[in-house]
Structure formats: structure tokens, C-alpha cells
Image: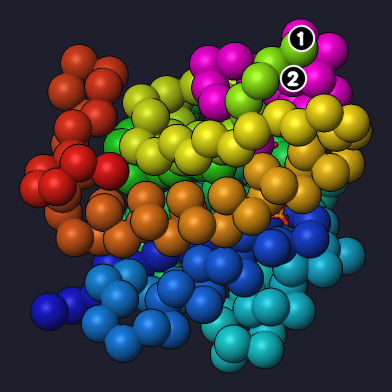
């Protein structure tokens, strides 16, 4: 069976990209990464694509006079590569409503909190300041509002006494590296449906 063609958008380190690349390399995995796009030329994650022999392109947002023009350039590159699903993996630009509508339910993001708690930046410091006992990560379909949309997979981790933002981030990141490949597998297997802004997963419960 043909594998789902995935485009991954990054801005930086790319550890989630690396986890997705590793998952796709496993025999029988139902998706392949066909293109990596970065809005920053210095994104360390581009090296993961190069090592894996995956096509990549830098599209600097600063080269465009408007958000829509930048989004259109992304869209053109994704369409030219025949991409069927877009994964945001530490892509730190807000995408415009037109792009999000064009890719509705074919555009997913990972965020390092149990959404809808703590969208945006400084997630871990905010979770600690709120005295949370658990934190975690969320893989979700993207809607125009930042870090919002139907939830596909969540993974929870404990907040431990003495945690600072850095060690909580590291614990959550390990969970991200399991959750994103799981979500990608479920989508690529055709088991994920959005019904009334909630996700149902055919077959066994997550
Ligand atoms: C990850 O923790 C991801 O969840 C977060 O950026 C980091 C990227 O790390 N994304 C967001 O905060 C999106 N709102 P990575 O480049 O090593 O994958």
C-alpha cells in the first residue's frame, strides 16, 4: 500500500523531526517524509533531513512582504512535492487562516503541554507556576488560533518536586518523541476522524 507523503515544517533543533524520521524508517510504517521545510537557514534540524536523504528547502519568512505571501510559498513547495499531510515540528510561525483552511484536517502540530492548558510560549514555566502535578504534550489538528484544534494524541508526565522548566521540558520532550510518531501512524493508517471538532480513532483506544 502507498505510504502517506508527509511534509515537516521546522524552525530549529528538529528533535521531533528526528523522531518522525526514525519512525518512518521502520519496516511497514505507513508514512514517509518527502519534504522538510524550514523558515530559518540556521535550523539545526535541517541536518537530520540531510542525513536521512530527505529533500529540504529553506523558505525564510523575512523574504516575504506578508504572511499570506510566505504561506503561499510554503503551500507551493508542499504541493509541488505531492505532500498529503503537513506536520509542524517546532515551527515557530503562526500560519494564516487561508493556509490553515486549505490544509484543514491535513495539518498537525505538536505542543509541549496538555492543551487547552498553556498554549503559546514559556509552557513549562507556566505549568510550574500554576502548581500542576502533571504536564505533557498534545498532537492536534491545526485551527487558526495558536496551539488549538482537535486533539489526536496526548501523553502525560508527572511534575516532580524540584523540577525547573528545563528538566520538565526534557521529560515532556521524551513523551513528544513517542506521541508524534504514534499520531502519525494513526493518521496514516486512516483511523483518525474529526467529528464535531473531536477526534475519534477507529480500532483500539489510544
Ligand atoms: C517542541 O517541544 C515542540 O513541542 C515545541 O517546540 C519544540 C521543538 O523542538 N512546539 C511548540 O511550542 C509549538 N507551539 P524540536 O525542534 O526539537 O522538535
Residue 46 against residue 186 in the figure, above or below: below
Image mark for residue 127: 2
Residue 79 locus on image (x, y percent): 40, 60
Let me know if residue 125 is in the magenta part: yes
Tell me which segment is drawn in magenta. Answer: 111-130
Quarter-of-image position of residue 145: top right
Q: Is residue 146 visible?
A: yes
x and y percentages locating residue 115 in the rendered image:
53, 22
Q: Name the residue at 57% across, 49% down.
A: 175
- Residue 95, compared with residue 130, is above or below; it is below
Q: Which mark is residue 46?
A: none
User: Is the residue indicated by label 1 positioned so its CB lies within 8 Å of ligand 1?
Assistant: no
Q: Nearer the viewer, residue 46 or 97?
A: 46
The x, y position of residue 181, in whole percent, is 43, 60
- Report the side of 141 relative to 136 (left or right): left
| Residue 46: quadrant of the picture | bottom right
Residue that protrudes farthest toward the top in the picture: 130
Instruction: Tell me what residue is drawn at x 36 percent, y 26 percent.
Output: 150
- Dot 2: within a 10 Å radius of its alpha carbon, few (fewer than 14), some, or many (20 or more) residues? many
User: In terms of image quadrants, where is residue 69?
Assistant: top right
From where the camera sits, is residue 121 visible? no
Outermost residue toward the front?
A: 161
Amino acid at each position: 500500500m502507498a505510504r502517506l507523503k508527509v511534509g515537516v515544517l521546522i524552525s530549529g533543533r528538529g528533535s521531533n523531526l528526528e523522531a518522525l524520521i526514525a519512525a518512518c524508517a521502520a519496516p511497514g510504517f505507513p508514512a514517509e517524509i518527502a519534504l522538510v521545510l524550514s523558515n530559518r537557514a540556521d535550523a539545526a534540524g535541517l541536518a537530520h533531513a540531510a542525513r536521512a536523504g530527505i529533500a529540504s528547502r529553506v523558505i525564510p519568512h523575512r523574504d516575504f512582504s506578508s504572511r499570506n505571501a510566505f504561506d503561499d510559498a510554503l503551500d507551493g513547495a508542499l504541493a509541488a512535492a505531492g505532500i498529503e499531510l503537513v506536520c509542524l515540528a517546532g515551527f515557530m510561525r503562526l500560519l494564516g487562516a487561508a493556509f490553515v483552511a486549505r490544509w484543514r484536517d491535513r495539518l498537525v502540530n505538536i505542543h509541549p503541554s496538555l492543551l487547552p492548558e498553556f498554549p503559546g510560549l514559556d509552557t513549562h514555566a507556566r505549568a510550574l507556576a500554576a502548581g500542576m502535578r502533571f504536564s505533557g504534550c498534545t498532537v492536534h489538528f491545526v485551527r487558526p488560533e495558536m496551539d488549538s484544534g482537535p486533539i489526536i494524541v496526548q501523553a502525560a508526565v508527572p511534575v516532580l518536586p524540584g523540577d525547573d522548566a528545563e528538566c520538565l521540558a526534557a521529560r515532556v520532550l521524551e513523551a513528544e518523541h513517542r506521541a508524534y510518531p504514534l499520531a502519525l501512524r494513526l493518521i496514516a493508517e486512516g483511523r483518525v476522524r474529526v467529528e464535531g471538532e473531536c477526534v475519534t480513532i477507529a480500532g483500539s483506544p489510544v
